[in-house]
Image (spheres, rainbow, N blue to C red):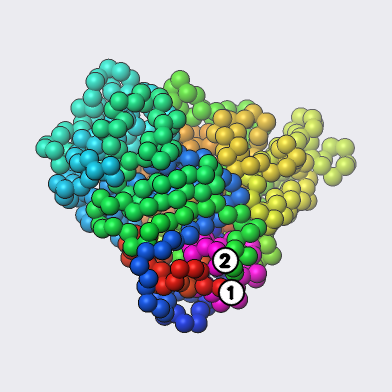
Amino acid sequence: MKKRNVMILFSATAALTLAACGSKEQSSSTSSNGGKTKYASEVTHDGTPIKGGTLKYAIVSSSSFTGIFADELSADTNDSTIGGLVDESMFEYDENRKLTNTGLASIEFDVENKTATVTLNSKDYKWSDGQPVTIDDYIFAYQAIGNKDYTGVRYDDDYKNVVGMEEYHDGKADSVSGLEKVDDYTVKIHFKEMSPSMQLAGGSVCAYIMPKHIFKDIPEAEWEKSDYVRGTKFVGLGQFKIESIVAGESVTLVPNEHYFRGVAKVDKVVMEVVSPDNIVSEMKAGNYDIATMPNSQYEAYKDLTNVTFLGSQASAYEYIGFHLGKYDKETGKNVTDPNAKMSDVNLRQAMAYALDIDAAGQNLYNGLQHSSNSIIIPFFKDVYNKDQEGFSYNPEKAKQLLDEAGYKDVDGDGIRENKDGSKLTINFAARTRDEANESLVQQYLNWWKEIGLNVQLYTGRTIELNSFYDKVQADDPEIDVFAAGWSTGYDPNPSGLFGETAQFNFERYVDAEGTAIMDKISSTESFDSAKNVEFYKEWQKYVHDKAFIFPTLVGEELTAVNKRVKYYDVNLGSKKSALYQVELTSETGAK
């Protein structure tokens, strides 16, 4: 779980088949709610491909991209969507999220000896500037994230688990002893402990690689400002290179002639940020070829005839989090404040029971979004517990919990006071997105008022996304509760989001019980699938009982594909729809 989610993803709750004339739809993906909804997951459109052309890709978001395209440093989905085309992960994965040996590198685990051997699959790889790739570039990325001057958010327990990494980070060693270079194309990584997450995409083994010949001469503390990270000088292993940038708005890409799988078939890819409020009219006009559509506007676009809609289960969820402490930069640890305003678990659970999430999904998102009973969402079907008790809408139970905790209406005005009789005002922060989200935020406030809580919107309005996360991550003391979202990645291991040293632990909630469960999930004992499921069930119950965070909306992702795109698919782990393989059947979009 690496990157903050900046686009909301939904799941359908009604039986819908999204078909298009003049196309051949293949395969299907089934929703998490009992398989009632099926969308095509791939499509082949009619027409003969032209040579080249410009593909237009819409990044549907209410916020601009920040422009940090290096995977090692990026922290939001807009940046990483672009970065994923100019950068490349070391490893690939299958439909079950398990690492394969088909990408840039192969990986071999030795659980008994606590090692993983990573080998480049070719000696002929080249960076986009034509320079050769060696295992030194991979070792360099590993050590860069562990360097004391590293400015990103990746350095966590997974990196500290490498033998010698902490000594290197603390300046007690010049290199990481556990990164044993075997030859120019192979490294053996020595770990303190082995974890099943190592076998998964986005798991416990670093998948980043950096051009050492570029970054070795730039002070690491200055990387984020470098044109090699956020500009046209970017050097990567991805499908494309950056030709031009309009800051925060668009990036024009051209094929990387050194891409290890082959040169892209289109001449250019233009990636533009498009407001959720405008994307329907833009797709109708044929101005973009591919876009993830906002489910709140389904009724407005469901009958479009110039696109095909594809569905996939989203690896993302929305949530409510409680500000319960701070991140101590000196120790690199989250510190829970027992006296935080939201420290009473009954208060937190009451706020969860007060929300009718399924009604919100039905009324605001056309039934294409619903509640989740667990913070481990149905996307992780191997460890998701469908029987876990969730926070079903129950305002009477919410009131009872508040009464028992001592939050009572002392003066008879319908609003509850603190346990000591003083005024209780709860500050709630939320991101600016679309009109449906604004309505949802107001509905939250109304539902909480109905159980007697005075919850006020922080600053009086929703906050621009990047500013919102800056405030939350900085532990703004004025924020008590916040609504946010995560793109989970493909590894459900919770330590990256809720561990003691996890910078993404925005709730700052840490206790011995939760740490012990996360340790079990990451242990060698969890290589046994039955034990793994058992530990994840334990985690899901723990999160529900402690309620430092609770999930709200989950769902499927609907992707609109213009009919001039010859073939596209959204199957998990598929490489068939990688943009370097996309072909167009006309110079302009179908209208």
The spot of residue 363 in percent (x, y) is: 69, 65
Q: Quadrant of residue 348?
A: top right
Near mark 1 (Cα within 10 A), the count class, few <14, some 14-19 or many ≥20, is some
Residue occupied by mark 2: 283
Instruction: Please indicate whether residue 507 sits to the left or right of residue 151 in the image.
Output: right
Q: Position of residue 576 (x, y in %)?
A: 33, 65
Q: How many marks?
A: 2
Residue found farthest to the right? 412
In the picture shown, does residue 284 fall above or below 315?
A: below
Any magenta on residue 511?
no
Q: Is residue 548 above or below residue 338?
A: below
Which part of the image, by quadrant, shows the C terminus?
bottom right
Q: Earlier in the sequence, mark 2 or mark 1?
A: 2
Q: Is residue 587 visible?
A: yes
Segment tinted magenta in the rendering: 286-308
Residue at screen point 61% across, 50% down: 62
Residues packed near mark 2 inside 10 Å, few (<14), some (14 to 19) or many (20 plus): many
The residue indicated by pointer 1 is: 304
Name the residue type under label 1: Leu
x%, y% of residue 538? 43, 49
Q: Of helix, strand and loop, which one carries label 1?
A: loop
Q: Please tell me which residue is depicted at 11% across the width and 37% down the height of the picture.
A: 183
Asked if residue 384 shows in the view, the reply is: no
Name the residue type under label 2: Met
Contact between labelled residues 1 and 2, with CB atoms less than 8 Å apart: yes
